[in-house]
Amino acid sequence: AKAILTENSKVLMAENHYGDGYVFAIGDPWIYNEYIDHALLPESFENLKAAKNLTDLLLGKVKK
C-alpha cells in the first residue's frame, strides 16, 4: 500500500489498487458518529468536511 497521509513518520491513511478494486485504510477512527459534526468538538476540527472529501474520493474511484 502507498501512504497518502503521514504524521511524524506514522502512516495515518494508505491506499492500494488490488485486482479491479481499490483498498483504502485509515489508522484512526475519526469518521464515525461522535467525530462527525459534534457540538463538543473544537471548531478547528473539520471532520465532517474530511468525511465528505473522502466520500467524493471513493465515489470517484467507482468504475462506471
Image (cartoon, helix red, strand yellow):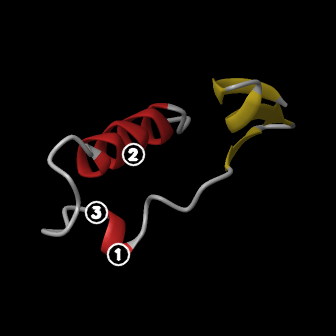
Q: What secondary structure is marked by label 2?
A: helix
Horizontal arrangement in the rendering, residue 41 relative to residue 19 (left or right): left
The spot of residue 43 in percent (x, y) is 14, 47
Above or below 32: residue 47: above
Q: Amino acid at mark 3?
A: Ile
The type of residue carrying mark 2 is Thr
9 shown above or below 48: above
Tell me the kind of residue under disc 1: Asn
CB-based contact (under 8 Å), mark 1 and mark 3? yes
Residue holding disc 1 = 33
Q: Which mark is residue 36?
A: 3
Tell me the quarter of the image containing the N terminus.
top right
The nearer-to-camera label among 2 and 3 is 3
Choose the circle earlier in sequence order: 2 or 1. 1
Q: Position of residue 18 (x, y in %)?
A: 85, 37
Reading the image, the residue beneath label 2 is 55
* Residue at image coords 65%, 24%: 4
Residue at horizontal 42 percent and vertical 41 percent from the top: 54
Around disc 1, counting alpha carbons within 10 Å, would you say few (fewer than 14), some (14 to 19), or many (20 or more)?
few
Disc 1 and disc 3: Cα gap in Å?
6 Å
